[in-house]
Amino acid sequence: DGGITQSPKYLFRKEGQNVTLSCEQNLNHDAMYWYRQDPGQGLRLIYYSQIVNDFQKGDIAEGYSVSREKKESFPLTVTSAQKNPTAFYLCASSILGAINTGELFFGEGSRLTVL
Amino acid sequence: QQQVKQSPQSLIVQKGGISIINCAYENTAFDYFPWYQQFPGKGPALLIAIRPDVSEKKEGRFTISFNKSAKQFSLHIMDSQPGDSATYFCAASIESQGNLIFGKGTKLSVKP
């Protein structure tokens, strides 16, 4: 089945450690996104990429890094510089050209807890 | 100006009733307004969307009403069912920018 796979679903991390969240899609979508979801805060954009080897910062990029070496993959690294990393992280993709049409396809999310 | 304000934060409706969620925006450059539905532990999924050239769009029991002059849009769920219990997000986008602005969400509970 086509879709977006995020892993791991749950992750625990000690303070000061970097952690990488995986996002893979087999929808042949050009654009990929990372959102952070906190209770009562909606979804906030961290980074997005419209093409391989290129990406842009979203509203809350500080303390995060991404790479886009393959069309199918868009991993997110939560660095130790992120002051409040405990959250639910969502990866999404869309067809290029539909980037601003709202037609995002989301994965099932990764819940990161910092101990 | 980039905000999308959504209300209420939570909503309890009896089975068979009408659920109404409202959103307001300031930026008149927004040209696409989708609604997403999210079940616990899952990612959001597109439910229904509207462009400002129409005032209403209906898909089954779900209807978006759009008021361009008031810069408001709303989601109506007719004959609400317990299976509709979820968090609903409104959103807005500008064609020239690569960002979808989400409201903060409404947690809907439909009681049997």
Image: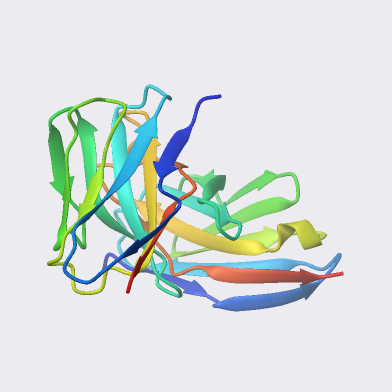
Query: Quick one: quadrant of the C terminus of chain A?
Result: bottom left
User: Foreground residue, B40 or B25?
Assistant: B40
Q: Is residue B96 left or right of residue B82?
A: left
Q: Give the image location of residue B92, x and y in percent.
A: 39, 55
Judged left or right of residue A62, residue B20 is right
Residue at image coords 32%, 42%: A22
Count the numbered circles shown. Answer: 0
Coordinates of residue A34 in the picture (x, y in percent)? 31, 49
> Compared to A56, does A70 lie above or below?
above
Residue at 57% across / 56% down in the picture?
A: B38
Task: Name the residue: 17% across, 39% down.
Answer: A67
Pinpoint residue A36: horizontal percent, then vertical percent: 34, 60
Q: Which residue shows up at 27% across the image and 64% down it?
A: B2
Residue A89 in picture, x, y percent from top left:
37, 56
Q: Nearer the viewer, residue B48 or A41?
A: A41
Instruction: Answer with left or right where residue B18 lies relative to residue A113.
Output: right
Of residue B108 and residue B73, the one placed in the foreground of this image is: B108
Q: Quadrant of the N terminus of chain A?
A: top right
Q: Is residue A102 visible?
A: no
Query: Foreground: B59 or B65?
Result: B59
Relative vertical location of residue B12 with respect to residue A105 in this rendering, above or below: below
Can I make out residue B26 in this image? Answer: yes
Q: Is residue A101 above or below residue B107?
A: above
**Color style of the picture:** rainbow
Where, by quadrant of the figure, is residue B12 drawn? Answer: bottom right
